[in-house]
Amino acid sequence: MAYVITGACIDIKDGACVKCCPVDCIYEGERTLYIHPDECIDCGVCVSACPTQAIYEDLRLPSEMAHFIAINREFFAADISGLGSPGGADAKRVACDHPAIAAFPRQPAG
């Protein structure tokens, strides 16, 4: 995995990162966005586009946010979103989230 979306995206989902991703590896859940770890090419364009500073390179992720590595990876599993590895499929939005995100307290509307 190269880049990880963290808690600053929850209930915000600005989407600037989705628009600039050259390989279309950012997917939308109900409350946040997720980077597919096998599709990301480590370009870092999404980091500079994110207005909430929610995206980190996995090696530079603050230790208190390390759990977001697993959250981003597990979101694509059959028992959560069922997306697997679609390789930039058209169905980018799913009506679910990783259980840790679903349990996260709602953020006030900005």
Image (cartoon, rainbow, N blue to C red):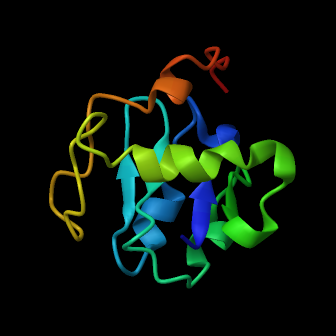
Residue 58 in which image quadrant: bottom right
* Residue at horizontal 66 percent and vertical 20 percent from the top: 107
Q: Give 15 or 23, whichever is nearer the viewer.
A: 23
Is 56 rendered above or below residue 27?
Answer: below
Q: Is residue 10 left or right of residue 82?
A: right
Q: Give 33 or 99, whichever is nearer the viewer.
A: 99
Q: Position of residue 108 (x, y in %)?
A: 67, 17
Q: Residue furthest left?
A: 90
Please say whether residue 103 is visible from this viewpoint.
Answer: yes
Residue 36 in which image quadrant: bottom left
Please say whether residue 14 is visible from this viewpoint.
Answer: no
Q: Give 99 or 88, whichever is nearer the viewer.
A: 99
* Residue at horizontal 84 percent and vertical 51 percent from the top: 63
Q: Is residue 26 left or right of residue 105?
A: left
Q: Is residue 84 left or right of residue 70?
A: left
Numbered circles on residues, count:
0
* Residue at horizontal 63 percent and vertical 46 percent from the top: 68
Quarter in which the N terminus is drawn? bottom right
Q: Position of residue 15 (x, y in %)?
A: 48, 52
Quarter in which the C terminus is drawn? top right
Q: Position of residue 37 (x, y in %)?
A: 45, 66
Q: Give 87 or 108, whichever is nearer the viewer.
A: 87
Is 45 rendered above or below residue 7?
Answer: below
Q: Is residue 15 left or right of residue 6?
A: left
Q: Position of residue 53 (x, y in %)?
A: 74, 55
Is 92 rendered above or below residue 43?
Answer: above
